[in-house]
Amino acid sequence: MSLAKISPAEAKRLLSQGAILVDIREADEHAREKVTGAHHLPLSKLDEADLALHEGRPVVFHCRSGARTAAHAARLAGKVGGACDAFIIDGGLDAWKKAGLPVATDRRQPIEVQRQVQIGAGGLAFLGTMLGLFVSPWLFAVPAFVGAGLFMAGVTGYCGMARLLAQAPWNRVAHGGAQ
């Protein structure tokens, strides 16, 4: 079973008629930017969650770009169990914003941990490459180490840099260490 994709405008129309909006992004993403009134149900906690909030009303799921909701449409459909109509916002929060629909942004919250990982890994790879070119070829070990770490994170699903960054003071304070 899959879920139908709808435009942000159609989602907004359904919400104005009583549909429930469910944000499946992780806590760090939701804390920084969200659609006001959206229920937060992180995809990582979906299996243990009881989605009793639909009460027969349509449910609209979203993530940042629409990729996670599309990839997990069958799991999301299973959570509503056919008790109501359920949909995915095509393009997610990015499309919602592009359509000019309102979002609540809290710039005091840090950017998502995954983006912090991308910035950190990219910065280390670039710096190590430049140092390897201009200081010592031994410093090419830095981007090699970063590349190996990213490869292992992709293969195993465990990212040491993400775990480390999740424990950084700016992330622990922001969302109570919920990573």
Image (spheres, rainbow, N blue to C red):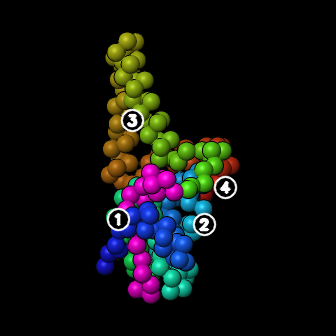
Q: Where is residue 119 shown, x and y percent of the image?
A: 47, 36
Q: Which amino acid is tagged 1? A: Ala
Q: Which residue is the site of mark 2?
A: 37
Give SS at disc 4.
Answer: loop
Q: Nearer the viewer, mark 4 or mark 1?
A: 1
Disc 2 from disc 4: Cα separation: 21 Å
Disc 1 from disc 2: Cα separation: 22 Å
Q: Where is residue 153 shown, x and y percent of the image?
A: 38, 48
Q: Which residue is the site of mark 4?
A: 176
Residue 138 relative to residue 53: left or right: left
Instruction: Tell me, yes or no, whether the highlighted magenta stretch contains residue 94.
Output: yes
As drawn, the label of residue 70 is 1
CB within 8 Å, label 2 to label 3: no
Q: Nearer the viewer, mark 2 or mark 3?
A: 2
- Whichever of labels 2 and 4 marks the residue nearer the N terminus, that label is 2
As drawn, the label of residue 146 is 3
At x 34%, y 31%, the residue is 144
